[in-house]
Amino acid sequence: MIDVLVIGGGNAALCAALMAREAGASVMLLESAPREWRGGNSQHTRNLRCMHDAPQDVLVGAYPEEEFWQDLLKVTGGQTDEHLARLVIRASSSCRDWMRKHGVRFQPSLSGTLHVARTNAFFMGGGKALVNAYYRSAENLGVQIRYNAPVDALELQDGRFVAARIGQERIPARACVVASGGFESNREWLREAWGQNENGEWPADNFRIRGTRFNMGVLLKHLLESGADAIGDPTQSHCVAIDARAPMYDGGICTRVDCLSLGVMVNQNAVRFYDEGEDFWPKRYAIWGRLVAQQPGQIGYCIIDAKPWGLFMPPVFPGEQANTLDELARKLGLDEQAFVRTISEYNAACRVGTFNHETLDDCHTEGLTPAKTHWARPLDTPPYYAFALRPGITFTYLGVKVNDQAAVHFGGEPSPNLFAAGEVMAGNVLGKGYTAGVGMSIGTAFGRIAGTQAALAARTQPETQNAGPLHATA
Amino acid sequence: MQQLESLAEQAIQFMPRSAVALTPEEAEVDRVMTVCNACRYCEGFCAVFPAMTRLLEFGKADIHHLANVCHNCGACLHSCQYAPPHEFALNVPQALAKARAQTYTEYAWPPALGSLYRRAGLTVALSMAGALAFFLVLALQISGTLLHEPLAGNFYAIFPHNMLALMFGVVFLFSVLALAIGVRRFWRDISPAGPAVSREAAAEAARNALTLKYLDGGHGNGCNDEDDRYTLRRRMFHHFTFYGFMLCFAATSVATLYHYLLDYHAPYPIMSLPVQLGIWGGVGLLIGPAGLLWLNLRRHPLHGDPAQRPMDRGFIVLLFLISLSGLALLAWRDTSAMALLLAVHLGFVMALFLTMPYGKFAHGIYRCAALLKSAVDRRKTAKASAA
């Protein structure tokens, strides 16, 4: 019998598999996707948020535990577990040598991302390069890897893992790590979670999925139905406003539109609805998906004029372009009068000081609701551009409750041999909101903990009635 | 796929920028780079992506600059979240390789001969066959036989020195001239403002070319061959090839100096400088091309442009044969087979000289120019952002 069965194929699953294997366990990893789509959402990631007290290779300055914690506290609005969060934060300071040992390479922050050079270590080549390195290392260490292996159920006995099932196939193991992600690719579940709004719309129908198409949440649903303790709100997620023309799945990073804080955002009634200049874009990009989801039609239009070009990452799709505001409104299908009125009111309210997109500058509006508190400059230099944006879900936060050993809880009691890591339990730390790179910090920390604990559990587990002879390393 | 097509369409609509229409291959680079520029994950691998981030749109000259900076290492393909089967179907090294073939074709001089690139494998094969036949017939004409009494390695008893010097000199100078005209036109297009090339930029470009910096993957672990694993094999075999070639070239140059300046004529003894340079260069030029061919045959099918494999392999095989025939000539220069071996060796060398401006050899010249442009631009950006 296998010692440790890892269900999932992304960063957390791979960290768990590698740690368990290093601890001497025999390990099998089941990835539901085919090989060419392996890695879950990790293939779309690009960095890891890291605590550090002094400059470290690619990281500049210092990012102490307390500051990281305060950042997390702020974005989650307190919906986090301080004990688990601090565990993640501390683990993020010491995991990178281990990552390097398994082939992950780091690089200084990418051009256009200087603001995270202090807090985030970038993977050279991005998340897919990381995933490739981990799979290579796992293969070299003798982890058995199966693709196209979607587990649909677990056999549990009083919170104890016995076996996993793929259709009719039964895979017993001494311990198990579930790292199978959230449910964001499951359109039906999203629809049900978001329900109908006051206009009779089903908002989730207009969502795009920035990440993998394989996170159907089958195992998450099964675990919750089997009595695992739930954590998190099914409508909460890492949700970014992305280009409305993005593909339904796997749009990844490039569908982001990064000029929002340099212009204004209107809804389909041509009305502004939130302070676009509240804070630096990297600190705010993750709230706009939800803001757009709450607008009629779940669509927003980011409007800029000719001035900001060159100050933000070039968008992947060209914007709608016009030489006058009413022409732009016509092209967008918005009410011309309302649109021109919104922009004129905004323009009149702008108090332009010294524009600087790299600081929280003094360009702001006066007497406008909602205000724009920074980078407020009149839209007066044609051509004007518009980008239609929709909510883009990266991953959902509903998950299973775990303790600091990554053990899944059933009725408040930790399972002796079932562990969880990654997005399936990220809700323990992230009740809402997001800050760049923290998903990978959680996945790496809990993946490594889960792998270690699973290897330990496999060694110390009493024989269950279904268990075969103990493995040689036991 | 529909989304892919509409993306391509939008990308094309987005770029009425330059007055010059793009070829389909160039338009594909534009589409690919527009996605890459919104992602940038691969920025650490090589000089292509930093050069890309300096641009907001991609004109014809930019595309050819980027295409020639690319070493086809493969890292960005294996790391790409948008590579097939993703609907964006990005294959950066392939798109750039296809554009690169157009650089060679378009900038070739005389222009009419540019089309030889499209059949570069055939060009090399025909040149080899023609040059071999020429020297064999010439040897027969001169000495009446290909097998002769041993001549103690005296090549000039078969082909007079001045005749060889004239033939090879003329062809070599023509090839150098043709390459120089091509690369000069290329440089003018990618650097229309004619920025001043600082000594530091030139030194950086030279270092990057001579060390094959961009086959190290940015992390020093190397580039990709058959899969997502990084190895230093390609870099090492290219070094054997290039430095082996340079030693052979040095051997010929030293011998030429001996001949004209010192009046010291071949055959030279084994321990003499030209022969030693030739031996060690020749060994490098056996190991390098053999290794490169081995790697080329194992390359991941999505790397580069399959249509250019005959060009790549033809060139590699030609280098190998030049070295092999040269070493054989040295080994058996005192036997009756010398004339035959000499004719064969000269035939291979002549084939190389003839095809230099119209085959794989040119990649090194355009690559150096593109690296220089990148080094110059990098300094401009650094200066601008410091200001």
Image (tube, grey):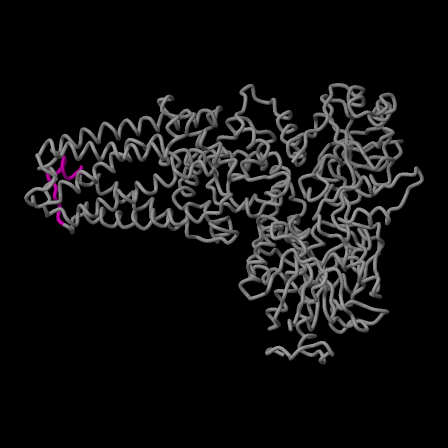
Lateral position of residue A343 relative to residue A439, left or right: right
Lateral position of residue B352 relative to residue B102, left or right: left
Asked if residue A98 is among those painted magenta in the image, a careful observer would answer no
* Quarter of image, res A115: top right
Question: Where residue B40 sits in the image (x, y, percent)?
Answer: 60, 41
Please name whichever residue, B279 or A67, is drawn nearer the observer in this view of the structure: B279
Question: Where residue A195 sits in the image (x, y, percent)?
Answer: 89, 46
Question: Where residue A213 sits in the image (x, y, percent)?
Answer: 71, 48
For the C terminus of chain B, the image quarter is top right
Q: Magenta part of the protein: which range? A: B256-269
Question: Where residue A231 sits in the image (x, y, percent)?
Answer: 83, 60
Lateral position of residue A220 relative to residue B249, left or right: right
Residue A315, visible in the rendered structure: no
* Quarter of image, res A324: top right
For the N terminus of chain B, the image quarter is top right
Lateral position of residue B52 relative to residue A250, left or right: left
Residue ID at (25%, 43%): B248
Residue ID at (73%, 52%): A215
